[in-house]
Every structure is written in C-alpha cells, then in structure tokens.
Image (spheres, rainbow, N blue to C red):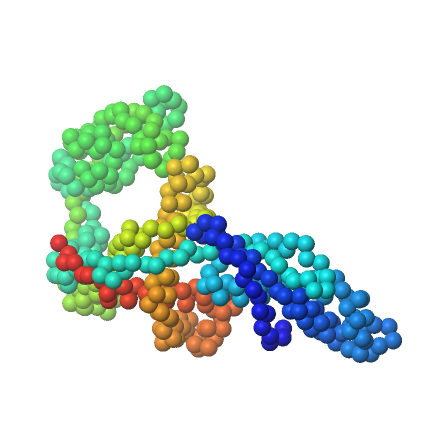
C-alpha cells in the first residue's frame, strides 16, 4: 500500500454506553478521487487490455473495465484506514470489529464519503488508589518443626505393616477387614465380603462401619445398616441404604524406618539426611513463596476492584467465560470425565468469575498506561533463554518456534503482567502477618 495520509475527518463521536462508541467519519471527494486514481494505476500495471502491453493501457480504459473491483478496493481501504486513524486520534481501544454503515455513497464526482463505525471499546478507567495497597508481609523463614513434620510424614509413608498381637483396635491403627453389602431396597444388588487393609478411627470408612470396627475384637463379625455417601464414586450406589457384612480379620502395627542416612538414600539416592532436610526446606520455601505471590496478587486485585467501579464490556466477559469453560472441560477430560450442562446458578458463578478476571486485567492495563510501564526487553530475553535451555535449543530457534505457534504475544503479556505486579508490590503497604 502507498505511504500516504488519509485525512479522515471525525464528524461525530457518540458514546452509546461506557463501552459502546459510534463514530461518524468522512473523506473529502478529492481524497476519494485520488485513491480511485492510485488504485487504477496499480491495476493498470497488471491489467491486460486488448491491443496494449501490460501497464500501457490508458487509465480511463482501466477505470471503466475494472470499475467495480477498483471501487470496492478503495472503499475497503479507506474505511479500514479511516477507522484506524480515528481510533488512534480519539485514544479509543477497540475490542470488537467495527460495524460499518456506508449509507448511499455512489462515487459521484464531488461526493464525499461519509460512513458510521460502531464498536465496543475498553471503558475509560482512571485507576485510583493503586499505590499503598495493603498486602500481608512474607511469612517468617521455614523452621525445623516444619521440616521435621515433612520428614515424619515421609517415614510414615515408608512404614511397614506387620501383624500385631493386639486384639482390640485403637484410633489410627491399621487392620485387615472384610466388608460385603446388599442394598436394602434391592437385595440382588450385592457384593460378597472381600478383604482390604484400612486405617481405623480416621474417617476413612462410612461412619457407622468405622464405629462398628472400633467396637469389635479380632475375628468378630457384625451386620451394620448404613447409607452410601452422596458423592460415592459408583453413582448407582450413592445415597443408597445397605446392610453391610463386616468382619475384623487382623490388626497390624506399623514399623517406621530409622531416621538416618540410609533412610535419606531411599528417598533421594546419593543424599545424606542433612542434604535431604535442606532439600525439603528449599521446597517448602519455594512453595511458600509461590503461594505468597499468588496471595499478594489476589489481595491487590480484590482491593483495586473494590476501589474502582466501572462497566465491563459484555463481549470480553463472554469470551473470558468461554475460556474458563474450555479450561474446566479440559481438566475433566484429563480425568476421563466430561463437563455436564451447567445449571443457571453455576453459569452465573462462571460469568461472575469471568467478569472479575476481565475487570482485574483492565485495571492492570490502565495502571501500565498511567505509569508508562512497558515490558523490559531483558525480561523477555531472559524468558526466551530460560525456555531455550529447557528445550536444549538456541534462543533464536526457540523464539522462531514460539512465533510459529502464535504464543509470543501471550508470553509478552504474562511478563508485562509480572512487571506491573512488581511495581504494585514495591508501592504497596505491607501489613504484619498475624
């Protein structure tokens, strides 16, 4: 396309709502004629008209022969360029394709091109109260008690169950039990008793059955009437009443491994107990930092949303809702399930979450504009280098691959969001954690 200006005239800006705008735009008859001539010249370079070499036919003949196509090109180019220039001049940020009304323009000599463009825009938000947002301080460093707790749970996981001489169960002991059942209303729906090992008195079984086992001695058998839980994994048994045949076969005692370097070696080959403890400490710190960051970001967004009320564009909420539903469907698909049709209340919750996400995103974007925060190039290069190292490729190959997958913009957006949050956290008011 030629390097030229379009001199679009913005005749009217109508705010139909805080997020809906209609522009009335106009091009003078001279600009239209000039573009018609330039487009005809472009056509004449390739046009083959009888008796003329390509590019040598008179302009009038080219205009006559390709008039409809030339005029269609002129209109589409002027409308697109005019809308783009007007939006830039008016500092409008569109979020939908404009709906164009051309009226009755007919390319008559001396006739100006006037048209309307209607579209959704980002609401104008002058974000307030974004400095001094109250957020909770980072928790104190990880202490030995937390590390020891983790070590203890690893020991329990590695513990060995051995037969016990006890004849009566105690809370938290392990036992081999047999449980069968027959539904009260449908006795043919039943299952013979089968043995399994379970921890008693810790809510692992249906309450009535757990209680029965806690009162039994080894070798004792009891019949118990109880109801399968509402969320039982076998749907045709959920909420059904059944008679359970229960037998306490054997009690077990758990022997825990000794806490030494040999134990550390079984958890992480080549590690001493001290090294294992240091690893655990680092993992707890990393997890805690991640949770702290997520928590602080949520506190900031909640605070900004509360302090800055504005209308959110419908189309942005709808597309965010679609993304949330897709994400829910993908999560379920990975677990071999499908997303059921959502009830009205559930759909309201999805829409409300989507609106909060859009609202938060717009607030961050406007803070970046107000503070002139732009993505730092070194952040971007560092992220590309990090991915390149993971994939064992060069940074150039990595960037090229990400570009071909169309994800570079998303990476830039995520990094800019991190940068905006860093700015907000630097300017926040840290409150002592209780």
At 42% from the left and 36% from the top, the residue drawn is 343
The answer to which of 319 and 12 lies nearer the viewer is 12
Q: Position of residue 112 (x, y in %)?
A: 65, 62
Give the farthest residue toward the top.
Answer: 185
Give the farthest residue toward the right.
Answer: 51
Q: Position of residue 263 (x, y in %)?
A: 19, 61
Q: Viewed as shown, does residue 219 lie left or right of 38?
A: left
Q: Is residue 128 visible?
A: yes
Q: Viewed as shown, does residue 31 lie left or right of 130?
A: right
At 15% from the left and 67% from the top, the residue drawn is 274
Q: Position of residue 113 (x, y in %)?
A: 64, 61
Q: Is residue 290 visible?
A: no
The image quarter containing residue 285 is bottom left
Where is 32 relative to 307, above or below? below
Q: Position of residue 129 (x, y in %)?
A: 26, 58
At 50% from the left and 53% from the top, the residue drawn is 14
In which quadrant of the rendered image does the C terminus lie?
Answer: bottom left
């Amino acid at each position: 396309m030629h390097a030229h200006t379009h001199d679009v005239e913005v005749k009217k800006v109508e705010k139909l709502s805080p997020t809906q705008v209609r522009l009335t735009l106009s091009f003078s008859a001279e600009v239209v004629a000039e573009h018609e001539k330039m487009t005809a010249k472009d056509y004449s370079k390739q046009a083959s008209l009888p008796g003329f070499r390509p590019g040598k036919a008179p302009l009038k003949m080219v205009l006559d022969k390709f008039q409809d196509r030339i005029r269609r090109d002129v209109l589409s180019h002027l409308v697109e360029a005019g809308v783009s220039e007007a939006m830039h001049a008016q500092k409008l940020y569109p979020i939908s394709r404009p709906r164009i009304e051309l009226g009755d323009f007919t390319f008559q000599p001396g006739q100006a091109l006037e048209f309307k463009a209607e579209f959704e825009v980002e609401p104008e938000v002058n974000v307030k109260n974004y400095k001094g947002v109250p957020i909770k301080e980072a928790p104190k460093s990880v202490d030995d008690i937390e590390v020891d707790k983790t070590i203890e749970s690893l020991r329990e996981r590695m513990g060995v169950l051995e037969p016990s001489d006890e004849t009566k169960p105690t809370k938290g002991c392990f036992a081999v039990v047999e449980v069968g059942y027959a539904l009260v209303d449908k006795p043919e729906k039943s299952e013979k008793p089968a043995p399994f090992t379970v921890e008693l008195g810790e809510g692992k079984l249906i309450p009535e059955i757990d209680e029965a086992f806690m009162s039994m001695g080894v070798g004792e058998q009891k019949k118990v009437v109880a109801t399968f839980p509402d969320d039982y994994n076998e749907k045709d048994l959920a909420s059904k009443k059944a008679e359970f045949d229960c037998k306490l076969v054997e009690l077990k005692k758990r022997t825990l491994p000794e806490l030494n370097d040999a134990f550390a070696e079984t958890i992480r080959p080549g590690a001493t107990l001290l090294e294992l403890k240091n690893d655990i400490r680092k993992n707890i710190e990393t997890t805690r930092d991640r949770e702290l960051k997520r928590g602080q970001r949520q506190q900031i967004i909640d605070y900004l949303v509360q302090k800055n009320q504005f209308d959110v564009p419908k189309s942005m909420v709808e597309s965010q809702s679609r993304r949330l539903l897709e994400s829910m469907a993908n999560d379920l698909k990975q677990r071999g399930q499908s997303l059921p049709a959502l009830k009205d209340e559930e759909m309201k919750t999805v829409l409300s979450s989507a609106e909060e996400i859009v609202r938060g995103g717009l607030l961050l974007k406007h803070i970046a504009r107000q503070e002139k925060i732009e993505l730092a190039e070194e952040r971007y290069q560092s992220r590309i280098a990090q991915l390149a190292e993971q994939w064992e490729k060069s940074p150039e190959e990595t960037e090229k691959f990400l570009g071909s997958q169309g994800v570079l913009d998303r990476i830039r957006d995520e990094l800019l969001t991190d940068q905006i949050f860093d700015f907000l956290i630097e300017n926040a008011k840290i409150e002592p954690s209780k």
